[in-house]
Image: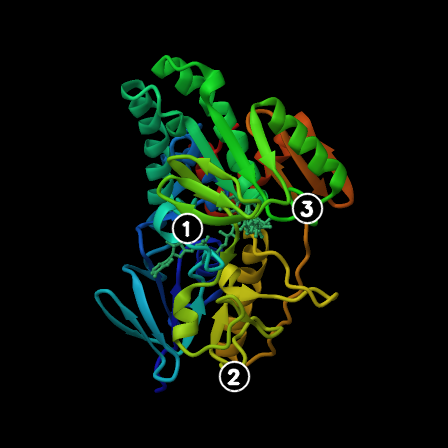
Amino acid sequence: MSRIPRIVILGAGYGGIVTAIRLQKELNYNEADVTLVNKHDYHYITTHLHMPAAGTDNPENARVNILKLIDEFKIDFVKSTVVQIRPQEKKVILEEGTLSYDYLVIGLGGEPETFGIPGLKEYALGIRSINSVRFIREHIEYQFAKFKREPNRTDYLTFIVGGAGFTGIEFVGELADRIPELCKEFDVDPSLVKIYNIEAAPTALPGFDPELVEYAMNVLQNKGVTFKIATAIKECTPEGVLLATGEEIKSSTVIWTGGIRGNHMLEEAGFETMRGRIKVDETLRAPGHDNVYVLGDCSIVMSPEGRPYPPTAQISMQQAEICAQNLVGQIRGSELKAFEYKPKGTVASLGRGEAIGIVGSKKIKGGTAAIMKKVVDLRYLYIIGGIPLVLKKGRF
Ligand code: FAD
Ligand code: NAD
């Protein structure tokens, strides 16, 4: 009798968890052994992380226990950190042990892209995980406490966000909402607090609808955010940032939201990568590796115009659906499906009650967009955990 094929899924982010959930529905008893590996025993909702990072929401609301999402009788969950992928040997090395696979799904997410800018790795903070946002939240509060002991150090009250892409914009929206609460709590004059959002491109949210970008900037400026557009960060130091214009801004808090790249282990494993990401074939497999699927921020999918689609939760989830179907197809010997991305739109929050978005061909802004953002978030909770998860973690 032939051996049951082994599927190993690396990462329980959007791509990994949705693949696991779909596989547990699709596969028949004894058709495959499926193992899901993740660093933590929880899945985190990356699209919420700007809120706990600023302290406008509790980190608990952005994470879900993985065992509440998967059926342990169908999927083995291994809580461990992947340290190496060995595609030639069909093995994955974990911090505690080794896993062999017949089919591999890589959904390890992205890493901050620092473009070699000196000091960013050492001195800037990134919004990447539950642990990183807990740190940012505590760090921000601590700056207020420190200022009370050293009132001449206004750099403690200067917050720099590097990059005005969607992550930067969503974070400054939350931070601007949080500052008045912190000023009240620590008896600090709000006029001493500065939030800078620094963007290298000629506009915030490069490539997005200009009318909505203008709306977003107005909302955020009215909340106290200062934009420095067409201004690249050249260096990050323990004292703040140096800009390409020659200006120095002193700050004890630099949050880097300047973009992401793929997981470093992909390059190390010998896959061909572009900014650490693997350009997958139409079935979502790594070229030359017909048993390795790559999802989400680790992958690149080209648009019909020949440009990479931006890495988002939306594309990761759509990839996961096809990846699961193709794994089942490969095991059963049926034809594989080609992945075709169907963008449903983009909605970005600007803090309490404000957002911008394009849904289908319709532009939305203000309260309507903020409600749409909540709907998108609730839909995701429903997809992975049904009504019980919506009721437990949903923010209404
Ligand atoms: P991730 O969701 O990043 O998951 C990777 C998983 O792998 C994690 O569970 C991690 O713990 C695990 N992992 C990593 N390394 C290891 C290791 N070595 N060993 C074991 N496990 C490991 N996209 C949208 O479409 N809409 C939005 O509104 C949106 N908002 C965003 C807001 C913020 C603040 C941020 C930062 C991003 C946002 N994005 C949004 C982008 C979106 O979150 C990412 O594109 C998406 O999370 C990518 O999914 P993924 O499955 O590739 O990886
Ligand atoms: P990004 O790559 O989209 O934006 C990074 C920004 O940093 C760019 O505008 C870039 O010009 C700027 N930048 C780069 N180097 C710089 C420098 N030296 N100085 C100043 N600015 C610099 O990255 P992101 O915002 O983290 O988004 C990552 C992905 O997640 C994207 O695909 C995005 O669409 C997605 N996302 C989506 C949402 C949403 O849909 N609501 C929210 C957050 C993130």
Q: Which tag is nearer the camera, tag 1 or tag 2? A: 1
Q: Residues within 10 Å of mark 1 (few under 14, many from 20)?
A: many
Considering only order in the chain, which callout, 2 or 3, is on the residue closer to the N terminus?
3
Q: Residue at x 50, y 24 (%)?
A: 177
Q: In the rendered image, which quarter is residue 166 located in?
A: top right
Considering only order in the chain, which callout, 3 or 1, is on the residue closer to the N terminus?
1
Where residue 354 appears, as percent x and y from the top left, is 62, 27
Amino acid residing under circle 1: Leu
Residue linked to disc 1? 120
Residue linked to disc 2? 288
Where residue 311 appears, as percent x and y from the top left, is 57, 56
**Residue nearest the viewer, comparing 178 with 384:** 178
What number is the disc on residue 286? none
Image mark count: 3
Real-space CA distance between mark 3 and mark 2, rounded to the nearest whole angstrom: 39 Å
Tag 1, which secondary structure? helix
Amino acid residing under circle 3: Pro
| Residue lying furthest right | 361
Q: Is residue 156 above or below residue 81?
A: above
Q: Which quadrant of the figure contains the N terminus? A: bottom left
Residue linked to disc 3? 202
Real-space CA distance between mark 1 and mark 2, rounded to the nearest whole angstrom: 35 Å
| Residue lying furthest bottom | 1
Where residue 153 appears, as percent x and y from the top left, is 35, 25
